[in-house]
Image (cartoon, rainbow, N blue to C red):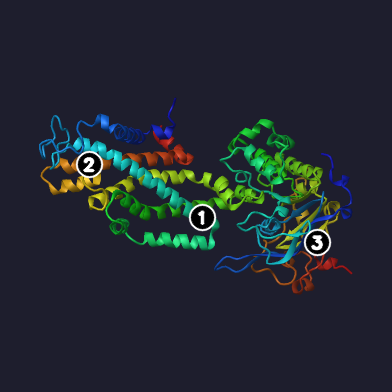
Amino acid sequence: MTDSTTTTAPVTERATLLSVDDLVVEHRTPGRPLVRAVAGASLTVAAGEVVGLVGESGCGKSTLARAVCGLNRAASGTITFGGHPVTPLGLRRRDRALSGIQMVFQDPYSSLNPRRKVGAQIADGLRTAGDTTTSPADLLERVGLPRDFAGRHPHEFSGGQRQRIAIARALAARPSLLIGDEPISALDASAQAQVARLMRDLAVDSGAGLLFISHDLSVVRLIADRIAVMYLGKIVEIGRTEEVWTDPRHPYTRALLGAIPAPDGAGVLPAELPGDVPDPADPPQGCRFHPRCPVAMDVCREREPDFGPVACWLHEPA
Amino acid sequence: MKLPQAWRQPLAIVGGVVALAWIVIALAAPLLAPHDPLAQDLPRLASPGPGHWFGTDQLGRDILSRVMYGARLSIPLTVLLVALSVLVGGLLGACAGYFGKWADETIMRFADLVFAFPTVILAMVVAAALGASLANAVLAVLVVAWPAYARVTRGLVLGVREREFVISGRLLGFSAWRSLRVDVLPNITGPILVLATLDIGTALLLLSGLSFLGLGAKPPSPEWGAMVSAGVEVFDSWWVATFPGLAILSVVLAFNFLGDTLRDALDPRTARAIKERAL
């Protein structure tokens, strides 16, 4: 396996494409306590950059992605895309300026309309971009599928093929920011790395940014320039992939890395993080991670570490 | 050519054959009917026999011919009625489900209002208010029939509208109408079609019922419900009411069988169950 993470240019030189600033997203269900799925998260994605967002299920990473697309309303904080504020997608047509954000969803079995031919669905994306020269078959070729798939219906394809088609449709709209909301978690292991790399290559080749969401750090490591680790609605650590991978600083990131099985033949079971993710409707006082943290101190129980790039009292910036 | 499994059930074949027979009779009534349905030139209240196989009514009209001509009236009107109900109810239900909020509240409260009354009574009231005619009877049944479609469609739209392909379409810049037309509606037509087919029987009964009560077809038009109504006045001559009644029964049953079959054919899981039963 070649290492594509080291070939990327320094992050700082690129223009910021997406900027999420202190975003809060709340889910209201009548008769239930308010859930802060995203509780003050900040993140940037530059053009041509791949940012991996990782965290356990229920940590709010999908909600954050949906908010970036305008599918969830921000309770507070701002999301800016290419200088435009991202407005919630209501019943009106989506703002043209925002059609530069496209998303590939998690479930390949519901991400394509079962009643329409694959080619027609890709053509929708081309129409969005006002592209009259490219044909749906061209895009199928770009995602590594035969051109004649355009005339078929989604039920004829496997999960991996469908996900490629969904990527082709998103790319047809010529997005400058592509979002993958766990696009590989429903695929089998052999297809996961392939599809992840494909998304990376296609996004970077077209100069677009990619926000890639996954709970699988080992795949994200292969494609991301930067990794953001999310826990219970907050981003607890963000940094260059090599740094986060080789020198994780937040105890939660360490725990996540420790949970990856090592294929060294030693048969050592991965370390397990004690306890479960707390209820986001009732987050713990102080640092959100302290009840599960092996190195929790007194200050962690009292005050929330609201700084970056590592939100941990052990790594408080001077 | 091989029929799909679901259509090879006995009830499906019976339903199909009977429905087809009625359609042929309706189309070819002038050729098939032995007498003029309105001519009063036969002996009155003659019992079934050669020359008038279904007997004659109190005005000396051939009942077989009237039943045949009645198919030209009842079947197209019922189909039209159900089509209109699907259109009105489906459209309103789809709007309620897709747009939600006040559209949903307004439309569904109207539907609840209609549901709150017994169907036949409400249809009678509407038909009586509009005046007795077949067109008004259709309108009256439409008023009571659309909410069922509105409810079913709304529920189905709610189930589909959050699916990822619908959201993908919206992210690509589909307008609400385009999203509804391209992504949502094609994925919910199956169940609505089944409901409509099953409903043809109910609608025919209701329409005939209104005519039976004198709120639909006017004499001398050979409408089945009105014929049953006339037959009740001469109870000793059983054939006057029985044959149009049987006509209603057979059409209702046929479309119920067809509706069941269609449901099985459109739902792969049921189809598998049929196959297992057939083995």
Q: Nearer the viewer, mark 3 or mark 2?
A: 2
User: Are the residues tagged 3 and 1 within 8 Å (C-beta)?
Assistant: no
Q: Which residue is mark 1?
A: B95
Secondary structure under tag 3 reads loop
Indicate whether A191 appears above or below A77. Answer: above
Whether discs 3 and 2 lie on one chain: the answer is: no
Name the subunit of mark 2: B
Disc 3 to disc 1, how far (Cα)?
Answer: 49 Å
Disc 1 to disc 2, how far (Cα)?
Answer: 40 Å
Q: Which residue is mark 3?
A: A250
Taking the spot 79% from the left edge, 73% from the top edge, the residue there is A299
Q: Position of residue B271 (x, y in %)?
A: 45, 38
In this image, A39 relative to B42: left or right?
A: right
Residue A39 at least partly seen: no
Taking the spot 47% from the left edge, 62% from the top edge, the residue there is B106
Whether discs 1 and 2 lie on one chain: the answer is: yes
Q: How many marks?
A: 3
Q: Which residue is mark 2?
A: B244
Q: Position of residue B65 (x, y in %)?
A: 21, 35
The amino acid type of the residue labelled 1 equals Cys
Name the subunit of mark 1: B
